[in-house]
């Protein structure tokens, strides 16, 4: 590990991946909660013509011009999407899809044009499609860090406004907040996150980094503050883990590994997150099924006792089995462990019999009363 940390390139890549995970994790939460998961995909693909435009203006691969161009076309795509949805009957997803395809097509055309100009400086420009983390320099890290710091400062300054616009934009508008300005600012910052990740994971995979950490964090909490913090941690860890795995294996691309690490976090969260995870839902479903079966058996014993006019009437288990069509021995054992039934002797019969306890009678009456209230 120390050997890897002493490597200049690996340190640069790890720090860049951490910055990318941090800004993507924080800003991605707002995109996910606003149900604009496609927004990250649109802005990342729309950044490609800006990359080409920045290259043409600078006459070479000058990172500042390229990132500025990417931010410009990303924001332009967002404005096009807003114009389409507000001036027509198109839904948001349709507007995002149109902006994505048009701007990405323009970017491919511009990239092809640059490659055919014979400019020697254009070598490797297509790496912005899928990222080239190994090419990151310390000066690039300063630029990425500056963008990340600005975005986080804006989020901290307008936290309450962004929170209100995210969850209830109509109420925010009624209070007099400039909802359109705030939504535009959120979109601009997501575009900033895309710009930060262009060199790391490229325009094609950047959408996953905007969405995956936030989706993973959402499974563990219902509070925005906790979600944002957890999403930032997941983004940072995913970035660093992907960078180190790439360093361990020869020829493994860093960008896709970072995305795979973030996707693994999503998979783990979907499976094991308390209350929301699939595993917990499966366990709860089994528990609910057992509880329902126990309530049905308990009410059956109660009705049999009421039919015979004897609260201590011993019901034969075989008869209860026949009534429910299943073996009820495990259910009886669970009810006995809860103190709701107890075994009884009914001479001259030698088969198992069960009788309700006082707690069992009270529980059966509670269940029947709740069922009657639901039916009413």
Image (spheres, grey):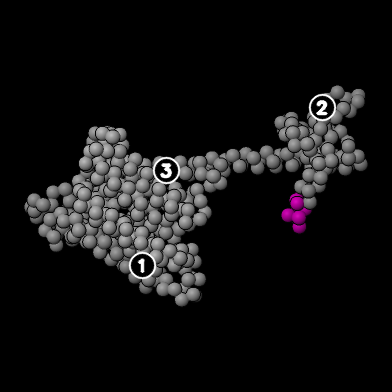
Label placed on residue 265: 3
Compared with residue 3, is residue 278 higher up or lower down, i.e. above or below?
Answer: below
Q: Secondary structure at mark 1?
A: helix
Quadrant assignment, res 83: bottom left
Q: Secondary structure at mark 2?
A: loop
Quadrant assignment, res 71: bottom left
Q: Residues within 10 Å of mark 1 (few under 14, many from 20)?
A: some
Q: Is residue 15 magenta?
A: no
Q: Residues within 10 Å of mark 2 (few under 14, many from 20)?
A: some
Q: Residue at x 47, y 44 (%)?
A: 269
Q: Which residues are magenta?
A: 370-376
Label placed on residue 54: none
Residue bearing the label numbered 2: 352
Q: Are marks 3 and 1 in contact (CB under 8 Å)?
A: no
Of pointers 3 and 1, the one earlier in the residue sequence: 1
Q: Secondary structure at mark 3?
A: helix
Q: Residue at x 62, y 39 (%)?
A: 286
Residue bearing the label numbered 1: 184
Compared with residue 72, is residue 199 higher up or lower down, i.e. above or below?
Answer: above
Residue 369 visible to the viewer: yes
In-front residue for pair 205/362: 362
Of pointers 3 and 2, the one earlier in the residue sequence: 3
Of pointers 1 and 2, the one earlier in the residue sequence: 1
Q: Main secondary structure of the magenta part?
A: helix
């Amino acid at each position: 590990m120390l050997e890897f940390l002493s490597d200049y390139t690996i340190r640069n890549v790890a720090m860049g991946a951490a910055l990318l995970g941090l800004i993507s994790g924080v800003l991605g939460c707002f995109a996910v909660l606003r149900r604009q998961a496609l927004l990250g995909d649109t802005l990342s693909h729309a950044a490609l013509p800006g990359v080409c435009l920045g290259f043409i203006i600078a006459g070479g691969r000058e990172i500042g011009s390229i990132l500025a161009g990417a931010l410009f076309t990303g924001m332009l795509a967002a404005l096009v999407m807003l114009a389409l949805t507000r001036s027509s009957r198109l839904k948001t997803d349709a507007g995002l899809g149109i902006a994505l395809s048009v701007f990405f097509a323009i970017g491919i055309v511009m990239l092809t044009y640059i490659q055919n100009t014979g400019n020697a400086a254009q070598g490797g420009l297509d790496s912005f499609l899928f990222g080239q983390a190994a090419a990151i320099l310390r000066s690039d890290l300063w630029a990425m860090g500056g963008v990340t710091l600005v975005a986080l400062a804006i989020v901290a300054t307008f936290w309450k406004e962004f929170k209100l616009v995210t969850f209830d934009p109509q109420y925010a508008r009624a209070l007099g907040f400039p909802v359109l300005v705030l939504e535009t600012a959120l979109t601009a910052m997501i575009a900033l996150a895309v710009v930060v990740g262009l060199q790391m994971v490229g325009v094609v995979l950047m959408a996953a980094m905007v969405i995956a950490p936030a989706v993973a964090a959402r499974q563990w909490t219902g509070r925005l503050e906790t979600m944002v913090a957890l999403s930032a941690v997941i983004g940072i860890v995913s970035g660093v883990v992907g960078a180190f795995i790439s360093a361990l294996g020869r020829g493994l691309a860093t960008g896709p590994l970072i995305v795979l690490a973030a996707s693994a976090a999503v998979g783990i969260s979907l499976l094991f997150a308390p209350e929301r995870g699939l595993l917990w839902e499966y366990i709860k479903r089994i528990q609910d099924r057992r509880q329902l079966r126990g309530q049905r058996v308990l009410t059956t014993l109660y009705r049999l006792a009421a039919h015979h006019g004897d609260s201590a009437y011993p019901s034969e288990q075989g008869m209860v089995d026949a009534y429910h069509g299943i073996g009820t021995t495990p259910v009886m054992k669970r009810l006995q462990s809860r103190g709701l039934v107890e075994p009884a002797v009914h001479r001259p019969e030698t088969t198992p019999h069960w009788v309700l306890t006082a707690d069992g009678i009270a529980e059966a009456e509670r269940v029947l009363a709740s069922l009657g209230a639901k039916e009413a």
